[in-house]
Amino acid sequence: MKKMMQILLAGAWALAACHAREGSEPEHLNSIDPTIGSVGTLLEPTRPTVQLPNQMIRFTPQRKDWLDDQISSFPLNIVSHRLGQVFSIKPSVKPPAPERWNERLTWDHDLEINRPWYYSTYLIDEEITVEFTAGKKTGIFRIKYPQAGSKTLLLGVYNPGPSRWELLPDNRVSGMETWQGDVKVYMYGAFNEPVTPVLQETSRAAVTFPATARTVELRYAISYVSPEQAKKNFEQEVAGVAFSRFVDEGRDVWDRTIGQISVEGGTPAQRRSFYTALYRCYERMTDVTEDGQYYSGYSKRVEKADRPFYVDDWSWDSYLAHHPLRIILDPKGEEDMLQSYVKMYHQSGWMPTFPVLFGDHACMNGFHSSVVILDAWRKGLRNFDIKEAYAGMRKNAVRATMLPWRNGDKTPLDDFYHQKGYFPALAPGAKETEEKVHGFEKRQAVAVTLGNAYDDWALAQLAGDLGKHADTALFAPRGFNYRNLWHPEKKMFLPKDDAGKWIPIDAKFDGGMGGREYYDENNGWTYMWQVQQNIPDLILLNGGKAAFEARLDGLFREGLDRSKYEFWSRFPDATGLVGQYSMGNEPSFHIPFLYNFTSSPWKTQKHTRFLLDTWFKDNIFGIPGDEDGGGMSAFVVFASMGFYPVTPGIPEYTISSPVFRKVSIRLQNGKTFRISAPKSSTVNKYIQSARFNGAPLSRPWFTHAELTAGGHLELEMGPLPNKQWGAE
């Protein structure tokens, strides 16, 4: 009974610290649950990160996923989304010993608190409460020890390479850890209690606190610039600041950020899924500017900064919905991010694809930053160097290799693409001829052709907007390269060899792990829709609107032709299946909205509601695939509001079915975009009629200019589809 009372008191103490202002906390904050999706269907779970929006410090306890009842350690910072963390701490009531660093700490799900600005957990065996709150470049841990036992804290690192912990006078501590081979990360901090070093090694240490100490606080700062800058970050942001003040300030920042979109109606579960998804859209990119400077992994040195410099973006995941959402909500921040891309190009010589702190992380395929830049330009963003951005886009298009997971100069396979208009595939069993092809990722010949056709279309479009007519003539035909792999009888994009012959494959299952010989993470049924830049032409290739609609219907009904475990043993990314449609991977996001280009827009309304209700529940299993730090969450935000950017680069949004009766988006220009659907419900999901700014609207789309002017979309909703509305 005594131990149970201790546990309950510890939980109550933590709850009081977090919710001292709960009476005034608005619903949009109460609706955020960072644990949603924290158990992956097959692949990576979400992480319930504590951070300020788009800021450097990110924290979550280290464990396999939400089902794991043990924590291995608490990091001082997650440097990059899913690419690692630095500086571990671990409290203990046991005397320090080398084996303590490998011990895991048992926690209880019901005694843990996860908020975007605050974390608390109770360690059952140790009877210790751990709390955390984040600043921009700083954080505060608060550790409540029991009365009995040693007050021990173990300090460690996560990465191989040179590292150190150093205990300084006046209860101060500093450290350096090498991340990803050559990036030096520095920390500087201070304890509120006297520190006694017990075990001291280069890369780890153990300290104890007085027997009378009950609550130990560690305030610290991180720097990617220098140890001196870490100390300066500490003094500027966190020295002498109360833990409760950090919590309150973090809550207020999230209140302003999440409160930019207000919704009414929907179920509590829908609001929880929506606002949690919106919170995840602010995990990255992250601002790594420190006092007018930043470490650049692109020049491998510290650079001066006259505006924020952002890293940690995976453009294959984020170009579809994440960047378009930020263009609406935070165009000024997006301009800083695009200028960061420009600086990366200037410093490294290449426009990056997956820019992280250490440089461009060669990953996936395509140069989709080109699509992002065109989309921003056409939506009115101007505060970035478009000429330099275009130069980087063009250099990638003519000189860079398109090989998946590779950076650098083009190869003979790229020359073949430029000459013949498609990336050549190998026949099954054929030996690879290009040594630079990734051993696991393969050629991905169809995916590379389709992705780069979209990128080249974007380049041609921007060239036209900038008056570069010779470049338009050069790149516009390449925007149609998808046609070279369209099989007119099978109505799919299929691989060809370097002699121009079709390679006969089972488009559902062939191509090795993830179909990577021909596709990427998904099969041919997903890639048959990857022509966002020219949907009318894709409709023509399929034989017209009626045939196109029938093919869409078939996608959601087509079987696997094998067991699920056999299918997923080869395509683990193709989760969230409905027929052959894969909700759990980015290339599928736009597909249900394609019905708006047929004579049956009501099917977009049907399918988007079904997909949201089926695959995005408000629980630990509520993400059907890799969420990718905002990539998939942005889809949830758009689809829940009832519109979506099918073609980034064309400043239009297609209309679906809002789950809410009212949506209001406060824009940076001082105006508000509104969607009113007063009868919307789980039953009333079909649009009966629409008005925009009071005038009847018969088309299922509106423009970005109409949105940013503070437009008002009014939707009359009902339980049965109006098969005429929007059917142009």
Image (spheres, rainbow, N blue to C red):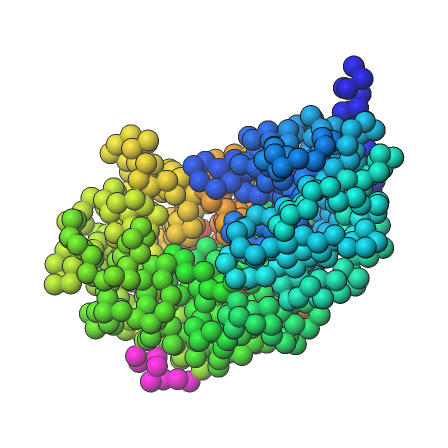
Q: Determine the image quadrant of residue 228.
A: bottom right
Q: Where is residue 139 shown, x and y percent of the image?
A: 73, 51
What residue lies at 77% left-to-right and 19% top-to-bottom? 3
Closer to us: 422 or 402: 402
Name the quarter where the N terminus is drawn: top right
Q: Where is residue 532 shown, x and y percent of the image?
A: 37, 60
Q: Which residues are magenta?
A: 467-474
Residue 413 appears left or right of 351: left
Q: Determine the image quadrant of residue 494.
A: bottom left
Q: Is residue 42 magenta?
A: no
What residue lies at 74% left-to-right and 52% top-to-bottom? 167
Closer to us: 148 or 620: 148
All told, the count of numbered labels is 0
What residue lies at 14% left-to-right and 55% top-to-bottom? 502
Q: Residue furthest right?
A: 212
Residue 14 appears left or right of 688: right
What residue lies at 55% left-to-right and 62% top-to-bottom? 183
Q: Where is residue 648 shown, x and y percent of the image?
A: 45, 63
304 to 523, vertically: above or below: below
